[in-house]
């Protein structure tokens, strides 16, 4: 089937379906990546590194406890290791550091209060973007339905061609020289 055999409406519908399939595939991919968790069998050093990477160093600017060379960061890493050996969970350890240093010790903002907007706002922006894309695609499909292609136009009859020639001749006579 050639491109000219497919009507503009069918082409527009196929394009819309392809766009929706691409958006669906992207959404599924993002969901899989977001839901994939960390491995359960981590060594103590890996757990210490992971927890320390989520905490700001109180001494260093813009460095995590895992990356900081400061003596305080070293002490914090040792505290994390001791608490893990004592059986504390990573969430309990983070909560103790938040209690001692405040929310500013977290590398990522908490999911409550005004800081929660950081987690909700991207979803709202993506949803608004999808609405805009859907609206534009719908307009594009309607426009292609209203505007027929030149290939779809019926050929002119002999009387129509004669009328066009006469109209052109009248226009040429009326033109100033």
Image (cartoon, rainbow, N blue to C red):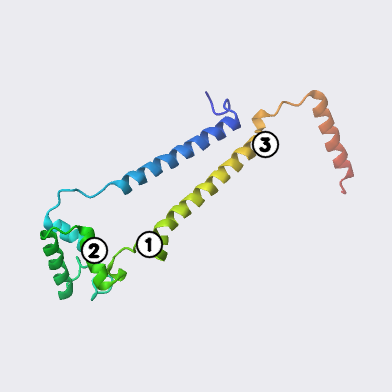
In this view of the protein, which residue sits in the foreground, 1 or 105?
105
- Crowd band around label 3 with a 10 angstrom C-alpha radius: few (<14), some (14–19), many (20+): few
Q: Which residue is mark 1?
A: 112
Residue 61 figure quarter: bottom left
* Horizontal and vertical percent position of residue 42: 15, 52
Q: Secondary structure at mark 1?
A: loop
- Crowd band around label 1 with a 10 angstrom C-alpha radius: few (<14), some (14–19), many (20+): few
Q: Which residue is mark 3?
A: 146
Let me know if residue 115 appears in the view.
yes
Let me know if residue 70 appears in the view.
no
* Horizontal and vertical percent position of residue 56: 26, 69
Q: Secondary structure at mark 2?
A: helix
Q: How many marks?
A: 3
Disc 3 from disc 2: Cα separation: 61 Å
Q: State the mark number for residue 94.
A: 2
- In the image, is residue 82 above or below residue 33? below
Q: Is residue 105 left or right of residue 138?
A: left
Mark 2–mark 1 contact, CB under 8 Å? no
Q: Secondary structure at mark 3?
A: helix
Mark 3 vs mark 2, foreground winner is 2
Q: State the mark number for residue 22.
A: none
Picture residue at 34% right of the left edge, 63% below the top = 110
Picture residue at 22% right of the left edge, 50% below the top = 38
Mark with earlier residue (3, 2): 2
Mark 3 vs mark 1, foreground winner is 1
In this view of the protein, which residue sits in the foreground, 150 or 74?
74
* Horizontal and vertical percent position of residue 148: 67, 33
């Amino acid at each position: 089937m050639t491109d000219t055999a497919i009507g503009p409406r069918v082409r527009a519908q196929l394009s819309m379906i392809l766009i929706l399939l691409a958006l669906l595939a992207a959404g599924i991919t993002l969901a899989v990546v977001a839901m994939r968790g960390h491995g359960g069998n981590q060594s103590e050093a890996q757990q210490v590194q992971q927890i320390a990477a989520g905490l700001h160093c109180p001494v260093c600017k813009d460095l995590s406890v895992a990356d900081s060379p400061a003596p305080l960061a070293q002490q914090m890493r040792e505290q994390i290791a001791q608490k893990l050996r004592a059986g504390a969970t990573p969430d309990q350890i983070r909560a103790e550091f938040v209690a001692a240093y405040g929310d500013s010790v977290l590398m990522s903002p908490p999911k409550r209060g005004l800081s929660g907007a950081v987690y909700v706002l991207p979803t709202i922006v993506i949803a608004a973007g999808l609405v805009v894309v859907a609206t534009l695609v719908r307009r594009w499909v309607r426009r292609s339905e209203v505007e027929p292609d030149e290939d779809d136009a019926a050929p002119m009859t002999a009387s129509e061609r004669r009328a066009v020639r006469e109209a052109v001749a009248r226009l040429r006579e009326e033109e100033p020289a």
